[in-house]
Image (spheres, rainbow, N blue to C red):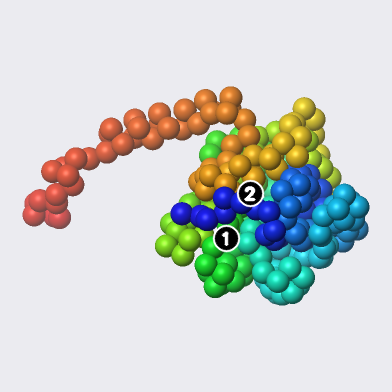
Amino acid sequence: MSRMRSLAGRAAVVTGGGSGIGAGMCRRFAHQGMHVVVADIDGPSAEATATALREAGARAEAVVCDVSDRGSVEDLATAAIGATGGVDVVCNNAGVFLGGNMRDFTVGDWEWVMSVNLMGVVHGSSVFTPHLVERGAGHIVNTASIGGFSTDPNCAPYTTSKFAVVGYSEALRKDLAPDGIGVSILCPGPVATGIDACDRLRPEAAGPSPVTSKAAVPVIAQGMSPDAVGDLVVRGIAEDATYIFTHPELGPLFEPRIEEMRAALANAPTPAERVVQPGDLG
């Protein structure tokens, strides 16, 4: 079980903390009395968030970090531990989105989305875990999505990355439980973020593409406040929640998949039917 019932006086690192859900978490952590390290590939955004926190009386630093680069995440860990004296909460939240028809996604699209959304979570979790284990307690929050459980058309790389984050984080939670480290999976529905503008962060190496992040505009237009998501994360850490959902009314989206799985399991062979008879081998 996680032992993070109180956050006051502790330290948190949040990737993608310069805007959106990440900035919301940073603000709510600061409100709890935490020392916050705001990490983002967009340095000015990270600094703007950290400055606002300091002006409100919180302790905060900004660190430029590219979560797709493990070396950059290692540098983040060194900077964060040095600035705070020890990190207690790690939020692997940085993410990107591209929307378009499956046939239009390029190899560069897939590599970029997976390198940030999945490998950014893997890098952040694996780099900070030894430090948390050494401290004997801590909590990791990995941002997935409602799309990590229910598929939608026109966002295959994003959905694939978020399904992978869910599976990875479920396994990580089981692995770290004996060490007293909690792992929660944040699964947001529509949130009012700037993810529709993440094309500006696309690396040159990903090459050109006919798809764009603008497809997210209709989804986030009426989304909930990032600060409200931050409050849910604070509660989720205190409760050592496996999943942190923002929109319970979206639960029925899971039902068709669950029913299909149940039907397929009902049609699967029984133990007796799985026994291979000598004559079956030809």
According to the image, label 1 marks what residue?
138
What label sits on residue 100 in the rendered view?
none
* Residue lying at 31% horizontally and 36% vertically, measured from the top left: 265
Would you call the spot at circle 2 few (<14 residues within 10 Å), some (14-19), or many (20 or more)? many
Q: Residue furthest left?
A: 278
The spot of residue 59 in percent (x, y) is 81, 59
According to the image, label 2 marks what residue?
143
The spot of residue 33 in percent (x, y) is 74, 52
Viewer can see residue 30: yes
The spot of residue 98 in percent (x, y) is 73, 45
Q: Is residue 176 above or below residue 153?
A: below
| Amino acid type shown at disc 2 | Thr
| Amino acid type shown at disc 1 | Gly
Instruction: State if disc 1 and disc 2 touch (CB < 8 Å).
Output: no
| Numbered label tally | 2
Q: Is residue 280 left or right of residue 163?
A: left
Work out whether residue 197 or residue 86 is closer to the camera in this orientation and state it.
86
Which SS class for mark 1?
strand
Q: Earlier in the sequence, mark 2 or mark 1?
A: 1
The Cα–Cα distance between marks 2 and 1, rounded to whole angstroms, is: 17 Å
